[in-house]
Amino acid sequence: MTMRWLTVMLLSMTTAMAAHGSVTKASFGTTPDGTAVDVYTLKSDTVEARITNYGARIVSIKTADKNGKVADVVLGYDTLAGYLADTAYFGAVVGRYGNRIAHGEFKLDGKTYHLPINNGGNSLHGGTTGFDKHVWKAREVPEGVELTLVSKDGDQGYPGTLTAHVRYTLHHNALRIDYSASTDKDTVVNLTNHSYFNLGGIGSGTILNDEIMIAADKYTPADVGLIPTGELAPVEGTPMDFRKATVIGKRIHDNFEQLKIAGGYDQNWVLRGSNGEIKTAARVHDPVSGRVLTVTTTEPGVQFYTGNFLDGTLHGPGGVAYGKNTGLCLETQHFPDSPNHPSFPTTELKPGQSRHSTTTFTFSTEK
Ligand code: BGC
């Protein structure tokens, strides 16, 4: 009897059954300094998503293709060791400032702040020890998990103690991410998720045959260091035009400066609609599996990145090598280097304010 009660209690502590799904927690190992890391499995009627509190990362998303065959559609590793050694931000929440800040420098309230330079001459994804490399606090919530990180005043050079919450919830075929952040001093913040999707399933080849639609009339052209020039350029008449669904590989090798600089697509698109309102950002369709990913967001921009820097040195479950273009990222965000571009939507956050944003990844199939 006692054993039965103990089992029941343990189960109810680790499993929260919600109306449409379940959340289960398991150990994912420990970091070299002995911090315990967990993995949460969110299950709905059609999708299983695994989230770890190491870097608030999406570990896997399993969903069926048009014939009912289930596969994992995000690049990841099967062990914590893989994530500890990761150099490509697989599945991670990047912050405090996702994407680049030119020369690792910005001015706020008349003071210049210096950030770690970790990408060419610039600061990328929050610095050398960004939010992707922290163990976040986690708590189960209905249909999901909420992760919390307190980044101290001066962390990676950024001012103000920033408290960030990222909540993943799975409802039927939609994985929703709610971000919120508050600070005790003026600061800048730009949080996004860096998952690499391969709708054919990891190990199925490149994403170059997928079709993508991006709901944007303009993009922010970048210099050789991938820092926006400040211009909002029309996509019309360029290989950046994805207003109609187009095969990704069709124009990726065109003689177009932006593609040459990045070795493929790696720019920020200016989404139609208002900053702060939920709208469709992009839709990806893999004609072979029939899987479709629809991304909606309240953010004003999206970085469409075709995994140009993956070179086969990182390996996933079963030893699969992640080569060039084997995954694509749709990083919903404020524009790169906004702190140095007053004309861009602001990323500044003041004490007493709370920054919220929402992004959803919805999975479906099409014959
Ligand atoms: C950037 C790429 C970078 C990648 C790192 C993306 O957000 O735009 O340039 O290489 O992150 O994995």
Image (spheres, rainbow, N blue to C red):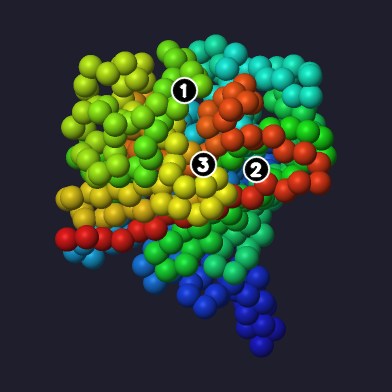
Tell me how many marks there are: 3
Image quadrant where one finds the N terminus: bottom right
Left or right of 11, for residue 242: left
- Residue at the spot of label 3: 300
For the point 55% across and 75% down, which residue is it?
17
Q: Residues within 10 Å of mark 3 (few under 14, many from 20)?
A: many
Q: Is mark 1 within 8 Å of ligand 1?
A: no
Other-residue count near label 1 (Cα within 10 Å), few / some / many at <14 / 14–19 / ≥20: some
Point out the tag, 3 or 1, that comes first from the N-terminus.
1
- On the picture, is 145 further left or further right than 209? right
Where's residue 157, x and y in %? 72, 23
In the rendered image, the vertical position of residue 21 relative to residue 58, given as above or below: below
Q: Nearer the viewer, residue 30 or 331?
A: 331
Q: Amino acid at mark 3?
A: Pro
Q: Secondary structure at mark 2?
A: loop
Q: SS for tag 3?
A: loop
Circles 3 and 1, Cβ within 8 Å, touching? The answer is no
The one of 174 and 221 positioned closer to us in this rendering: 221
The label nearer to you, 3 versus 1, is 1
- The residue under label 2 is 135
Residue 193 picture location, percent across and down: 51, 43
